Image (cartoon, rainbow, N blue to C red):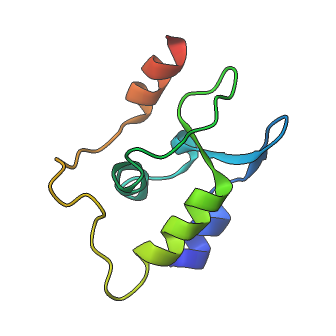
Amino acid sequence: MREELQALVPVRKGLTEHYVRLRDIPNPWRSEFANDSIGATLPAISGEAECHFVGDWVKWLSLRFAPDYRPLYDGVLYREISDAELDQARAK
């Protein structure tokens, strides 16, 4: 499953960094990744909604599919992030 999910999400090239768009990650993985990434440094990509450095995405994949995975911020209210919400964030 990990390899399939990783293959599904395109890695994009910015001016100086490689990144993934949160929008390209299908739910429920998108929302789990965003929840586990609270406080992470995010690249600011012009014209894009929330993006993450590819290294953070790859690291999360290895943690998420480990047999003993637990959400990093267990006490944080988990919510599903929709495409519409990401579109609205990009418009701001």
Residue plotted at (51% across, 70% down): 61
Along the viewing direction, whichever of 2 and 56 lies nearer the viewer = 56
| Image location of residue 5, percent across then percent down | 56, 67
| Image location of residue 23, percent across then percent down | 53, 40
Residue plotted at (78% across, 44% down): 17
Q: Is residue 68 above or below residue 60?
A: below
Along the viewing direction, whichever of 81 and 60 lies nearer the viewer = 60
| Image location of residue 83, percent across then percent down | 44, 33
Q: In this view, does 46 lie above or below 24?
A: above
Q: Which residue lies furthest to the right in this view?
A: 15
Q: In this view, does 26 lie above or below 81?
A: below
Q: Residue furthest top?
A: 92
- 17 relative to 9 in the view: left or right: right
Along the viewing direction, whichever of 74 and 86 lies nearer the viewer = 74
Residue plotted at (73% across, 53% down): 11
Residue plotted at (37% across, 36% down): 82
| Image location of residue 73, percent across then percent down | 25, 57
Along the viewing direction, whichever of 3 and 34 lies nearer the viewer = 34
- 16 relative to 88 in the view: left or right: right
Q: Which residue lies furthest to the bottom in this view?
A: 67
- 38 relative to 71 in the view: left or right: right
The part of the image, by quadrant, that contains residue 52 is top right
Total labels: the figure holds 0
Q: Is residue 19 above or below residue 61?
A: above
